[in-house]
Amino acid sequence: MRLSRDDVVMRAGVVVVAAVLLLIVGLPLWSLLAKGFENKDGHFVGLANYIAYFSTPALFDSALNSLHIATVTTVIVVPLAFLYAYALTRAVLPMRWLFQGISLIPIFAPSLLPGLALIYLFGNQGFFKGALGGPIYGFDGILIAQVFYCFPHATLILVTALATADARLYEAADVLGASKLRVFFTVTLPGAKYGLISAALVVFTLMITDFGIAKVIGGNFNVLATDVYKQVIGQQNFSMGAVVGMVLLVPAALAFVVDRVVQRKQVAMLTARAVPLIPRPTFGRDLFFTLYCTVIAIGIVGILGMAAWGSLIKYWPYNLSLTLDNYEFSNFDANGWMSYVNSLEMAALAAVGGTALMFVGAWLNERTREFFIMRGLVQFLAFLPMAVPGMVLGLGYIFFFNAPNNPLNFLYATMGILAINCVAHFYTVGHLTATTALKQIDPEFEAVSASLKVPVWRTFGRVTAPICLPAILDIAIYLFVNAMTTVSSVIFLYAPDTKLASVAAVNIEEAGTTAAAAALCIVIVITSAAVKALHLLADRYLLDHLQGWRRR
């Protein structure tokens, strides 16, 4: 079959995208896997490192601790998030927008922020020390902080699941005289079951892979993420760090596989004839859920507020007068405010470069005809980061980019590698967002352009990209916010002059200056929230502009 010029260009583009993804995702993970079979001198030792790991009780106990805390966190977070999402979608709440906005706050914060706030509340010098019946450091502290950190992720998924409801099912249940409880268990829960499973798997994976919370408030309760850090940074044992990294990868990968299987079985809940469910005011139900959401919101705002207040305290707990001295970061870290500037620079690089790669890559993979093997490889590599913890990917970057014989070695310890790592870590969500937006465009646009002999890249620039501009902006903001808050994926990759704000907060807290660490976290929260607010305004403008363009 003779290929047209457009076909050749599109296929060449798919090959380039596959090569880039192989470079930033596939090869670093392969280097990590290979390192686990070598000793400190780089000689092949087979399974010796794995045997040493599983025969060392302290290391093996960390894996059990991670599974234990992840399971308990999931069991607590999913029901809490389900009730909150149910309130947002099925009850008539006053100031619903406020409750929805408050639930998103933890997304804008580095994961160590709730740990810092809990130290102020329940630590050895905290306001309520001893209130939990023992020290906050360890299992209890990690659990409470993780509930705060994971809650918005589960809520977002469950709001989406509960929003897609067909009112006709509920009307039929009313006609048949079914009780509210029976309707809940026979209509509502079955309709949201895939969302519940996805939320549970996301929370489980977040907990297994998080580093910041366990580092700040874990105490002697070791988990896999902190073990990787100790092996690499503390003992310079890269081979054992690779082994722990691979062990850390297993539960996250299994959760990802289960989620893929579940999503394949999911069927559409809304048909073309479906009637959207609009909740009607019911005093008792609405009062209950308003009180419930208020309690949850107070908990979220309380933890954030405690961190913010702690960042303004002169000398906790002996001098509670307010000061801005803790925001003079040069007094606590050699980089001072430059760490924050570095974060802004890295986040901007990741947002611009990553968005271009994700959207163009998704477009090439979606619109290229046939070429199934290479497109399948791109799809596989695009989905792979979802199953890979950030710390594992960062460790793979050490072994791959820092290898002396790698021509890309010059990237190591630069701002570029931090941005590349961030793009690779969060690639899957951006790819899915772009693919979803592209699927909503009528293929006739391309068909008409092709019939008029318009090159495919011109159609992309004049039609496809403008129509998908809201989705492109969503991807950019997603990358920017996550680049500002990430800790685990970059903790191994920075140099003294490229240290990021989230990493500086970890180092400052490690040095014992909790107030300054909290201050840096608050700066990150304010920045991320401000960028998200601008995004919402831009989204509204783009939506109005796009509707006007379509009408013309």
Image (cartoon, rainbow, N blue to C red):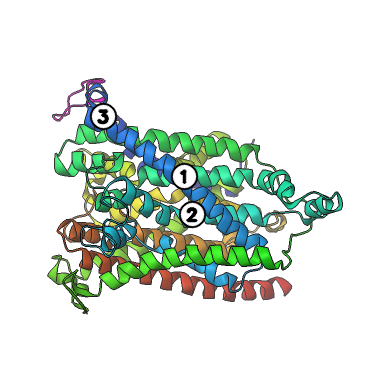
Quadrant in which the C terminus is drawn: bottom right
Which residue does the image show at 72% across and 64% down from the upper left? 279
- Height in image: 551 above or below 342? below
| Residue at mark 1 to residue at mark 2: CA–CA distance | 12 Å
Which of the 4 quarters of the picture holds residue 126? bottom left
Quadrant in which the N terminus is drawn: top right
- Where residue 432 appears, as percent x and y from the top left, is 54, 50
Which residue does the image show at 31% across and 31% down from the upper left? 33
- Residue 338 visible in the current orientation: yes
Which residue does the image show at 53% across and 54% down from the upper left? 81
Q: Earlier in the sequence, mark 2 or mark 3?
A: 3
User: In the image, what residue type sits under mark 2?
Assistant: His
Report the label total: 3
- Give the residue at mark 3: 36
- Where residue 518 appears, as percent x and y from the top left, is 27, 66
- Where residue 168 appears, as percent x and y from the top left, is 81, 54
Is 43 a magenta residue? yes
SS at badge 2:
helix
Q: Is residue 541 left or right of residue 520?
A: right
Viewer-closest of 241 and 145: 145
User: Which one is in front in this view, the residue at disc 3 or the one at disc 1?
Assistant: 1
Q: Earlier in the sequence, mark 1 or mark 2?
A: 1
Q: Which residues are magenta?
A: 34-50
User: Which one is in front in this view, the residue at disc 2 or the one at disc 3?
Assistant: 2
Residue 74: mark = 1
- Height in image: 532 above or below 410? below
Q: Is residue 92 left or right of residue 433?
A: right
Residue 153: mark = 2
